[in-house]
Image (tube, rainbow, N blue to C red):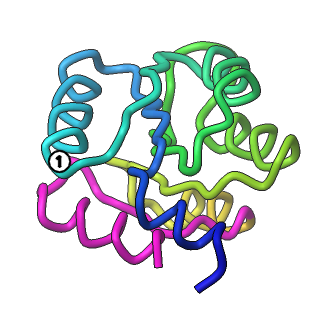
Amino acid sequence: MDSREERREASPSRVLVVEDEVLTALDLQACLERAGYRVVDLAFSGEDAVRRAAELKPDLVLMDITLKGDLGGIEAARLIQGNGGVSVIFLTAHTDQETLARARELAPRAFITKPFMERELLDKLAAVRE
């Protein structure tokens, strides 16, 4: 194991949560922090997510596909990935094939359907860390 891998194992993953529903965002934050992840910030719009990801350089972005505002989750994830190749896990209550096909173009690390189950969320995050 090289020193970069040792540092990653020793420190919690830094996660940016992007979710426009405040209660869901806070629930995700609590779940992640209980599991030892470091939530670097909560973003409630696509525009804010792009800005915060550029500033904070998270290891992972947990991104709702459908966000209020002009910049949706898929478009925000595309911009974030273009600025540094950050891993993305999409959250969605929308499982229609057209939306999922658009999201798959970005090769996300995983999809989590809302309402999410804590165990599913943590299992998918653990798989991304490996």
The extreme right residue here reads 82
Q: Nearer the viewer, residue 57 or 10?
A: 10
Q: Residue 39 location, x and y as percent?
A: 38, 33
Q: Is residue 98 left or right of residue 19?
A: right
Q: Which residue is mark 1?
A: 115
What residue range appears in magenta? 106-130
Q: Is residue 84 left or right of residue 30?
A: right
Amino acid at circle 1: Pro
Q: Residue at x 44, y 51 (%)?
A: 13
The extreme front residue here reads 3
Q: Residue 3 location, x and y as percent?
A: 64, 71
Q: Residue 36 location, x and y as percent?
A: 24, 48
Which quadrant holds residue 87? bottom right
Q: Residue 68 location, x and y as percent?
A: 51, 17
Q: Is residue 108 left or right of residue 12?
A: right
Q: Residue at x 46, y 45 (%)?
A: 62
How would you rate the neighbour count of disc 1 (Cα within 10 Å): few for under 14, some for 14-19, many for 20 or more?
few
Whether residue 68 is situated above or below residue 67 in the rendered picture:
above
Whether residue 60 is situated above or below residue 121 in the rendered picture:
above
Q: Residue at x 45, y 60 (%)?
A: 96
Q: Residue at x 27, y 15 (%)?
A: 22
Which quadrant holds residue 56? top right
Q: Is residue 73 left or right of residue 29?
A: right
Q: Quadrant of the N terminus?
A: bottom right
Q: Is residue 122 magenta?
A: yes
Q: How many marks?
A: 1
Which quadrant holds residue 103? bottom right
Query: Please, what secondary structure does the residue beneath circle 1 have?
Result: loop
